Structure formats: structure tokens, C-alpha cells
Amino acid sequence: MAGRVTNKLSARFVATVTEPGRYGDGGNLHLAVSPTGARSWLLIFRHGGRQREMGLGPARDVPLAKARVLAAEARALLADGVDPLEHRRRVAEEADKAAQRVPTFGEAADALIEAMAPAWRNPKHRAQWRMTLGRARDGKGDLTGEGYCLGLADRPVDEITTADVLAELRPIWQAKPETAARIRGRIEAVLSAAKAEGHRTGENPALWRGHLDRLLPPRTKLSRGHHAALPYVDAPEFMRRLRLADGFAAKALEFTILTAARSGEVRGATWAEIDIDAKVWTVPAARMKGAREHRVPLSGAAMTVLETVRPYRRADDIVFRGAKLYAPLSDMSLSAVLRRMKASTITVHGFRSTFRDWAGDATAFARDVAEAALAHAIRDSVEAAYRRGDALEKRRELMDAWARFLGSGVPG
């Protein structure tokens, strides 16, 4: 074959020939023209003592130069004693097997998150799903190794059992009931999607009614917004102890208490949101629970916290840096500070209640000013229609009084 003349055909001939028949290019490569005028490539060869034919594709999709390359590759296989047709079949089977590979729980979770993301109004939902499903990523896209479902992340979805789901839920079922309920629902959603994709069969092991409700005790009932809180009379002593702690998480918790903000708002804070001169932190609507921009007046104590962490400012602009490079603190980092302080019976979110109780019981500030400080929506539509400002200066007086109380125990 090597001595035969090749490259007999031209690209123009291949594109214009209409007479039915087979036209050789050399090296056993032929252009086959059907009675209907369809043109395709054909390689004729002998293997195992018999003549065989292998199609190389239609001429409209495979130009002459590509057909020659394919023919040369097939001839190289023949030279090694390999049947090109059998080789192509094996390659196709391996590709099919790869396409049918069962994804891991983490991969299935990523796929579901990407599919659902366009329907989520707030970008933080994506981060919450990744964190709770064990797929949180740092600023470089690497997995942080944090989350509640790390035990499932690398397991093929068709191997996950009820026992696997229970192993993730039981440690937090009573301690963090609302979080546990959300995680169970998200695990169920991922496994349901995997079943719809054909990667699982049978009952969903994370199903609640008629399944896990028979295996897990009733959750502790917590109404939304009622988090374990520190009595405000104990807050100054707690703050004194907190200020003895080192680390960004401790500083973030102190800033959270001083601003009466939600921990997620603090953990995601960037220096671009801070107006040092005006002493105002502006949280964008995208990061607020109510999807409204919120301005936070910063007391002298809050500014001191910022000055403490400011020398560590990085290119990612995150105020309270996490352990991972270019990543904020995790949602568990502030709770970890409470555990180290032997105060695990209270919650980070509960300090908002501590602030609200203090403002209502120990000060003369108006109720609407305290509610505005917490970024609570005005439920009365008439009142909301007449409210034009955000009472920033009145709230500044309130937050200054709160800082003084936390520092000295003297009511505002």
C-alpha cells in the first residue's frame, strides 16, 4: 500500500462530482457517490484474511484533507495488526461508558445548583447551597472542605443510602433544627434530580414523610426569628471577654454585635462598602435579606474594630478574611467563637434580640428607630408610604448609645 499513488482527487472534484460510482484517492481511500448524488468516504482494506469496508463520514462534513488523515490513521492501525473497525467500536463503547458514569453527590449538587441559580433572586442562595452541601469554594474556585455534607460529597449518587443521610443529619438534628431541615430538603432535591437523570432508582433516602420521620425524633420547634439570646444585662461582660479573643472571627463577631447586623452581612462585608470618613457601612440590596440597601451608622467602637483589621486588607477587599485565601469567614466561624468562650447556649443571631430588648427596655429611643437599625421592613403599608428616609442620624445616636452600654454597662 505504501508504494501506491495517493492524493489523486482534488477538493473541487469532490465538491462537484455527481456521477454515481467510487473514485479512488489512493491508499484504498474512495469517494463513493450514490445514485441520489450523496457523497461519502470509504476505506477498503483487508484484515484477518477478508476484505472490509469502513465509512469515514459524508463528504459534506469531512473535507478531503480530513478524510486523508482518517485513512492514514486507519492504515497505521492495520500496520500494527489492529482492525480499525473493531478499534472504533471499542472507542465508542468507552465513550458511552464515560457518558453514563454515575456522578458523585457533589457533582450532582453542583449541576442542580447551576440549573436552579437563574431562578434565585439573591446570589447568596448559591453560596448557601454550596456550603450546606459540602461544596463551598474559595475565591480561586477550590473546595474549602467546609460544610455539613462532606461525607456525601464524593459518594456516587446511586450508592447513597438512608444510613448515609442519617449520618449527616443526626449530629445537628436537635442542635440546629432549622439548618438540619434545610439540609435534608436539599439532599432530597439533589437525589431526586439524580433519579430524574437516570442515575438512581428506588425511594429517595432523604424523603421525610413516611421515611425519615420514622427514624428521627421530632425537631426542637424554633419560630423563625427566635434565636437563643444573651440577656442584655450580661452583654457588657460578654463584650469584655470577647475583646480578649484574637482572630478575625472574634473581630467579626464584635462588629456584628456593635452594628446589630446579621452575621452573613458582616462576613460578606467589603472595604468598598465602608465610608471611613462618613462612618457609614452601606450593605447593598443583593446581600440584604429584604433585598433593600441598608446604611449602618458606625459607632466609635465599630470604627476601632475596622482600624484593627484594616492593615490586613487584601486584593479581594473582604473586611474579615477567612482561613482560606481570598475567601470570607465561613458561616460557622462566629459560632465557633461562642463555643470557645463557653457560650454555645446562645446564638450569633440572638444578639439582634439582645440589642432590641435593650433598646426597648433600657432606652427612650422610638420603636421605629430600633426596628430600622435591625433593617426590619415596615409592615404597615400606610406608615411605609409616608416613611421617606432611613433615620440614619437618629440610628447613629442609638448605635453610639449601644456601644457605650456594651463598653461600660451604663444604659443609653
Image (spheres, grey):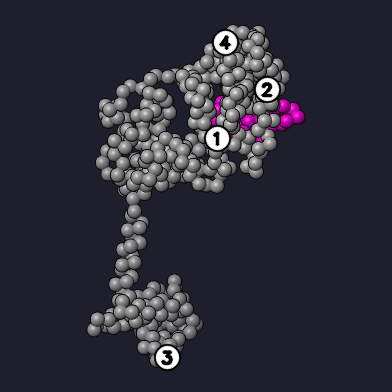
Q: Which residue is mark 4?
A: 233
Region in magenta: 262-287
Q: CA distance from mark 4 to mark 3?
A: 98 Å
Closer-to-camera residue (329/122): 329
Among the 4 quarters of the image, the one containing residue 172: top left
254 lies left or right of 339:
right
Residue 200 horizontal/vertical position (percent): 30, 45
Q: Do the numbered discs 3 and 1 sit on residues whose CB atoms are within 8 Å?
A: no
313 lies left or right of 42:
right
Residue 2 horizontal/vertical position (percent): 39, 88
At label 1, the amino acid type is Leu
Is the N terminus in the top left, top right, bottom left or bottom right quadrant? bottom left
The mark closer to the camera, 2 or 3, is 2
Please identify the residue farthest to the right as the structure is shown.
277
2 or 3: tag closer to the N-terminus = 3
**Residue drawn at (49%, 21%), measured in percent from left and top?**
342
At label 4, the amino acid type is Val
Q: Which residue is mark 2?
A: 301
Is residue 45 visible to us here?
yes
Regarding mark 3 in the picture, which secondary structure is present there? loop
**Residue drawn at (55%, 47%), measured in percent from left and top?**
140
Closer-to-camera residue (195/297): 297
Q: Do the numbered discs 2 and 3 sit on residues whose CB atoms are within 8 Å?
A: no
Q: Residues within 10 Å of mark 3 (few under 14, many from 20)?
A: few
Placement of 217 over or under 141, stated as above or below: above
Identify the disc placed on residue 329. Answer: 1
Q: CA distance from mark 2 to mark 1?
A: 21 Å
Identify the disc placed on residue 412. Answer: none
Q: Which residue is mark 3?
A: 5
Q: CA distance from mark 3 to mark 1?
A: 70 Å
Regarding mark 4 in the picture, which secondary structure is present there? helix
